[in-house]
Amino acid sequence: MKKLPTLVLGIVTSIGGFVEAGSISTAAQAGSEFGFALLWAIGLAALIVAMLSEMAGRVACVSRRSMAAAVRERFGVPFQLVPLVGELLIDVVLLTAEIGGAAIALKMLSGIAFPWWIVPVAALAWLVLWLGSFSFIEDGVGLLGTITLSFVAAAWWLQPDAGEVARGFVPRLPDGEVTRYAFLAIGIVGATVSPYLLNFYSSGTIEEGLGEQDLWINRTTAYLGMMMGSVVSMGVLVTAAVVLRPAHVMVDSYENAALMFEPVFGTWGTALFALSLGVGCFGAAVEIALNAAYALAQSLGWSWGANLPRRQAARFTAAFSLMLLVAAAVGLTGIDPLQLTEIALALTVLFMPAVVLPFLVLMNNSAYLKTHRSGPIGNVILAALTIAGALMALVVIPLEIAGG
Amino acid sequence: MSDAADLHVVRDVLDKAVVDRDGRPMGRADSVTIVVPSDGPPRLESVVIGSTVLAHRAAPRLARWAVLERWLPVVSGPPVAVPFDRIECRGLGLKADVQAGETAAMNLEQRLQRWLARIPGSR
C-alpha cells in the first residue's frame, strides 16, 4: 500500500491528461453533428487505449523496456523504421496542432492573433522540459489538466435525457451522412489510440521505477485512468450535442466549439473553455515533445530520461528541443491547427497496424514478460485489433476526402 | 561471451542495447562483422555501432545518398567496431568492455554536452 499515492496520482493525471486538441475537436464535432450517437466510439477507443497501455506498461514493468526499445530489439531496425517514422511524423504534426490549440486558447483570452502565441507556447513547453523532473512534468500537467473536468460539469449541469445518452453507447447507423459518421468514428479512435500515448506511458512506467511487483498499479492506472479520462471526452460530446446541435453550430473552429459553454457558464464560458483547451493542448504538447525524444533515444540506444541531468542525456535533450523548434516553425506558417489535428488523426489510423502488430508478438515473448504473457483472450483481442486497425487504415484516406 | 553455444546473432546480438563497462549507454548493435576463414567456420568478429551502418541496414537506398553518406559520420561520428571478445551478452542487452567516452560512439553526445553546458538552469 506504500505505492497508493503513486496509484491515485497516476489515475488523476491520466484523467487530467486525457483530452487534447484531437479528442476535444472530434468529440465536439461528433456531438454537434450526430448528437449522442457516437458516444460508443469514445468508450470503445478508451477501452482499446487502456488495454494497449496496460500491455505496454506490463512490458516496461517486467523487462524495463519501453515499446520503442522492445520493438527495435525484437523486430530489428528494418521493420521498426515503419512505426518509428510514423510515430515521429505524427508527433510533429500533432505537436504543431497542440501548440496551435494552446495558442488559439490564448487568443480567446487575450484577443491577440494566435500566430503571436506560437513561439511563447513552444518556449514555455521547452522550459518545462528543460527544468522539470519526470514527476514534475507528468504530475504538473495532469493536475492542471483536471480543469478539463469542466466539460463533465457542463454536461452534468445541462441534464441531458439519460435514456438518450445511454442509447449513444449502442453503435447504430445514422439517418444520413454515413461517410461523415464513419469518418468521425474512426477519427475518435485515431485521437485516442495515439502511438505517442503508448510509448509515453511505457517510458513513464520506467521513469517512475515500477517493477514486476507493481503490475497491479499499472493495470489499475491504465484501465481506471483511461476509462475515467474518457468521461471528459464524453463530457465534450454531450455538451456539444445539447448546446451546439439544436443551434446548428458546426465545429469548424475552436471559437465555435467554445459556444458550448455559454449556456452553462455564461460570460465566463469562453474563458473557461479557453483555459480547458489551452491546458489540455499545452500538457499534450509537453508530453508529445518528450515522447519523440524518448522514442528516438530508446530506438538508437542513447541515454534518456527526464530524471537525468539534461547534460547527461544531451542527444535526448537535443531531440525534444528540435521537435519543439520544428513544430513552432511549422506553426508559424499560420496553418489551421484544427486541420493539422485531422491530418494527425488520419496518420495515426494509417500507421495503427504497424503499431498494434508488434504487441501481438511481444505479449507472447517470455524474454520480455516472463510469466506475465498474454492469455488466449488477450491474443484474440489483439489479433482482432490488428485486423480492425488494418481495415481502418485502408478506409481512412478515402473517408477523410469524402467525409472530412 | 558467456554461453557461445546458444548464441543466435539476430536474436541475441543485433539491435540490442550496448552499455560500456560502467553501464553507460553507447548505442545499439547496429551491425556485426563476420569473418569467414578459409580453414574454419565463420566467426563473429565485432559488434558495430554507428549511424552509417544503421542507415545501410534500415534503408539501403536512402543510405547511399551522397549527402547522407558524407554527413552522417561527420554529425554522429564514424562507426565503432567493438571486438566480440570484449562483449558480454546480459539478458536483453550487451555489455562492452570499453570506455564509451573514449570511442567515437559518443562524439555527438559530447559535442552537444559542450553546447548544453552554455545554457543556464538545467536540471
Image (cartoon, coloured by chain):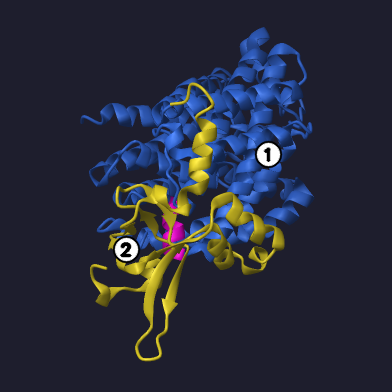
In this orientation, which residue lies closer to the viewer: A131 or A19?
A131
In this orientation, which residue lies closer to the viewer: A278 or A247?
A278
In this orientation, which residue lies closer to the viewer: A26 or A21?
A21
Residue A181 % position (x, y)? 69, 46
Residue A287 % position (x, y)? 52, 34
Residues packed near mark 1 inside 10 Å, few (<14), some (14 to 19) or many (20 plus): many
Q: Is residue B33 visible?
A: yes
For image coordinates 34% across by 68% down, the residue present is: B84
The secondary structure type at the circle numbered 2 is strand
The residue at which mark 1 appears reads as A341
Position of residue A292 relative to residue A371, above or below, is: above
In the displayed structure image, the side of residue A253 where residue A90 appears, left or right: left
Residue B113 % position (x, y)? 49, 37
The numbered dot on residue B87 is 2
Task: Tell me the magenta residue range.
Answer: A67-75
Q: Give the letter of the chain under mark 2.
A: B
Q: Name the amino acid, label 1.
A: Thr
Q: Give the letter of the chain under mark 1.
A: A
In the displayed structure image, the side of residue A284 where residue A205 appears, left or right: left
For image coordinates 39% across by 28% down, the residue present is: A135
Q: Residue furthest left?
A: A1
Position of residue A377 relative to residue B115, above or below, is: below
**Mark 2 to mark 1 CA distance (whole Å):** 46 Å
Front position among marks 2 and 1: 2
The secondary structure type at the circle numbered 1 is helix
The answer to which image quadrant residue A392 occupies is bottom right
For image coordinates 20% across by 31% down, the residue present is: A1
Which chain corresponds to the colour blue?
A
Q: Residue furthest bottom?
A: B39
Task: State which quarter of the image contains the C terminus of chain A.
Answer: top right
Position of residue A188 relative to residue A13, above or below, is: below
